[in-house]
Amino acid sequence: MKNRLAGFTLVELLIIVAIIAVLLAMAAPPVWKAKKKAQELKEQAEKRSDQVDKEYLNRDKERTLNATDESSRDGGLILEARERFLLKEAGLCHRLRGCDRWT
């Protein structure tokens, strides 16, 4: 009787490789679709974020331009009415040029 070594035959290995290839071929398209969808969602989120950033920038620009007109009367500072009030109440108005003109 022949002593046969334990192991796989070439045919068995080829069958296993073929099965793995078929499974990968079946699994790959859904993975690619999911990856593509994730990329699209990321791009949409970035666009929305850019739009929000632009809106904030435009608001800040308008606020700065509007405040600049007042700042020349207020000693070069851009302060809101609440900030002006708090400075007066804290007794710090004397340190700021033009503070006495604040109403």
Image (cartoon, rainbow, N blue to C red):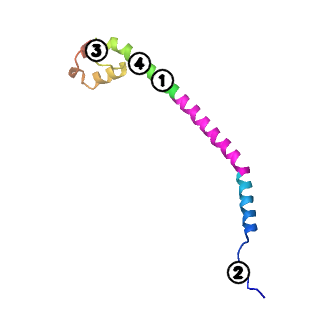
Question: Circle 2 is placed at which residue position?
Answer: 5
Give the foreground label among 2 and 4: 2
Position above or below: 103 against 48: above
Q: Which mark is residue 61?
A: 4
> Which quadrant of the view contains residue 72?
top left
- Label 4: state its secondary structure: helix
Q: Earlier in the sequence, mark 1 or mark 4?
A: 1
Q: CA distance from mark 4 to mark 3?
A: 19 Å
Counting residues from the start of the chain, the first of labels 4 and 3 encountered is 4
Q: Give the mark, 3 or 1, whose residue is nearer the N terminus.
A: 1
Indicate the amino acid at tag 1: Lys
* Mark 3 to mark 1 CA distance (whole Å): 29 Å
In this rendered view, identify the residue nearer to me: 40 or 59. 40
For badge 2, the amino acid type reads: Leu
Q: Is residue 29 magenta?
A: yes
Q: Which residues are magenta?
A: 25-49
Question: What residue is disc 3 on?
Answer: 74
Q: Viewer-nearest of labels 3 and 1?
A: 1
**Residue 85, quarter of picture:** top left
Specify the farthest residue to the bottom: 1
Specify few, some or many for label 4: CA neighbours under 10 Å numbering under 14, 14-19, or 20 or more.
few
Determine which of the numbered discs, if any, sits on residue 40 in the image: none
Task: Give the percent coordinates (x, y) of residue 28.
Answer: 69, 48
Q: Could you say whether the residue bearing mark 1 is in a helix, strand or loop?
A: helix
Between 6 and 81, the one nearer to me in the picture: 6
Which residue is disc 1 drawn over?
54
Where residue 65 sits: x, y (%)?
38, 14
